[in-house]
Amino acid sequence: MSEYPRTVLEFEERFATEEACRGYLAGLRWPQGFACLGCGHPKAWWTSRGLLHCARCGHQTSVTAGTILQDTHRPLRLWFRAMWYVTSQKPGVSALGLQRVLGLGSYHTAWAWLHKLRRAMVRPGRDRLAGRVQVDETLIGGEKPGPRGRLAPCPSMGWASGQASCPASAPRSPRSWPPAQVLPASAPGPRTAGTPRRPLPPASLRTGSPRADRTCPLRP
């Protein structure tokens, strides 16, 4: 199986037709060549319904059976574009954004597609984060009134929402960052004022892994 396309142009050229999409799925399902599920015969032909018809026993097989594409009534080209869009956006996508890009008439359809793709992207038995782990702008704790993230007030500097950026959170070169600290895992629970920051949840980070925190050092 050749490498997956890296650019939009390569993607559009490779998956321009339904036949190209079905051929790609067939290559993933049978990397060593087609084998009938009924008799194991290696020869088959495509039907008008997009099924593989065995030349010996007549058994018909769908390349989407057992996948998130099973029983779909939408073109495979549209599904492939949804996969490309979801996996190529670094900050993530929303159901509304997916609906607009694909031209789907229903928000519910876009929401269902997005959740199917997200579940399919989770690799079973994936490893936990280890080594030097950098956490950038992570908020952990209970809910508080007022703005969130970069707009949160910094009491030590008298900075508030709508004013200039907090001087303490201004971009710094990697050499001026504080050294990473080895923090023990802690039990989950709401964070109260005055308590130290907690590391990442134990499900994502191995105990004892150093964490470099780049959030404002003066915020509570």
Image: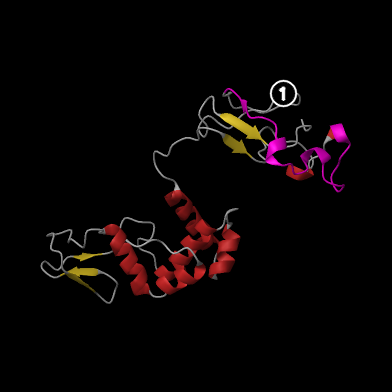
Residue visible at 52% across and 34% down?
204
Q: Position of residue 108 (x, y in %)?
A: 53, 60
Q: Quadrant of residue 60?
A: bottom left
The residue at which mark 1 appears reads as 195
In the displayed structure image, the side of residue 201 where residue 15 appears, left or right = left
Depicted 119 relative to depicted 5: above or below: above
Q: Position of residue 74 (x, y in %)?
A: 42, 69
Is residue 177 a member of the stretch shown in magenta? yes
Q: Position of residue 34 (x, y in %)?
A: 21, 63
* Residue that lies at the very extreme toward the bottom in this rendered image: 48
Residue visible at 33% across and 68% down?
22
Residue visible at 36% across and 68% down?
21
In the displayed structure image, the side of residue 212 where residue 36 appears, left or right = left
Depicted 166 relative to depicted 193: above or below: below
* Residue that lies at the very extreme toward the front in this rendered image: 175
In the displayed structure image, the side of residue 171 where residue 188 appears, left or right = left
Q: Is residue 148 visible?
A: no
Q: In the depicted view, which residue is nearer to us: 25 or 104?
A: 25
Query: Magenta span: helix, strand or loop, mainly?
Result: loop
Depicted 100 relative to depicted 149: above or below: below
Report the label total: 1
Is residue 49 a member of the stretch shown in magenta? no
In the rendered image, the quadrant that contains the C terminus is top right
Depicted 16 relative to depicted 128: above or below: below
Magenta stretch in the rendered image: 156-184
Q: Is residue 86 visible?
A: yes
Q: Which secondary structure, mark 1?
A: loop
Q: Position of residue 37 (x, y in %)?
A: 18, 58
Amino acid on which disc 1 is placed: Thr
